Image (cartoon, rainbow, N blue to C red):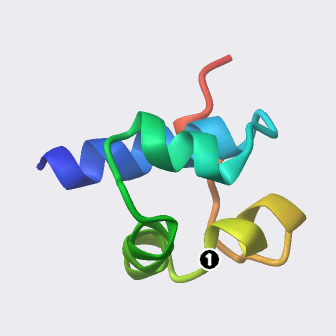
Amino acid sequence: MQHQLRMKEAARRLATCEPITAICYDLGYTNPSHFSRRFKRSFGCSPVSSVSGRCAADFSIYIQA
């Protein structure tokens, strides 16, 4: 459950153009590679792909208006 919450928060923060490494460390991951693997497992794309728009996942559900 905590993993899912952290990944949702990561998706929300990636939409704000915050640096991926900052998000990684703020969410308690100590290794950016591990964070990227967990993110890809959760959403089907890497954090870099989600920022660049090359990801098919819809992250808008995690962004609060």
Q: Quadrant of the C terminus?
A: top right
Asked which quadrant contains residue 14, the reply is top right
Residue 30 or residue 51, whichever sits in front: 30
Circle 1 packing at 10 Å, graded few (<14), some (14-19), many (20+), is some
Is 64 situated above or below 36? above
Is 42 situated above or below 16? below
Point out residue 29 in the picture as x, y percentages from the top left corner. 35, 53
Point out residue 64 in the picture as x, y percentages from the top left corner. 60, 22
Q: Outermost residue, right direction?
A: 52
Q: How many marks?
A: 1
Is 48 situated above or below 41? above
Q: What residue appears at the point 62 percent right and 76 percent down from the top-left corner? A: 46
Is 37 situated above or below 11? below
Residue 24 or residue 58, whichever sits in front: 24
Residue 61 seen in the current view: no
Q: Outermost residue, left direction?
A: 1
Q: Is residue 25 left or right of residue 4?
A: right
Residue 63 or residue 50, whichever sits in front: 50
Q: What residue appears at the point 41 percent right and 65 percent down from the top-left corner? A: 31
Point out residue 38 in the picture as x, y percentages from the top left corner. 37, 73
Question: Circle 1 sits in a helix, a strand or a loop, which is it?
Answer: loop
- Name the residue beneath numbered marker 1: 46
Asked which quadrant contains residue 50, the reply is bottom right
Q: What residue appears at the point 73 percent right and 44 percent down from the top-left corner? A: 19
Q: Is residue 54 left or right of residue 14?
A: right
Residue 33 seen in the current view: yes
Residue type of the residue flagged with mark 1: Ser
Q: What residue appears at the point 49 percent right and 76 percent down from the top-left corner? A: 33
Q: Outermost residue, front direction?
A: 30
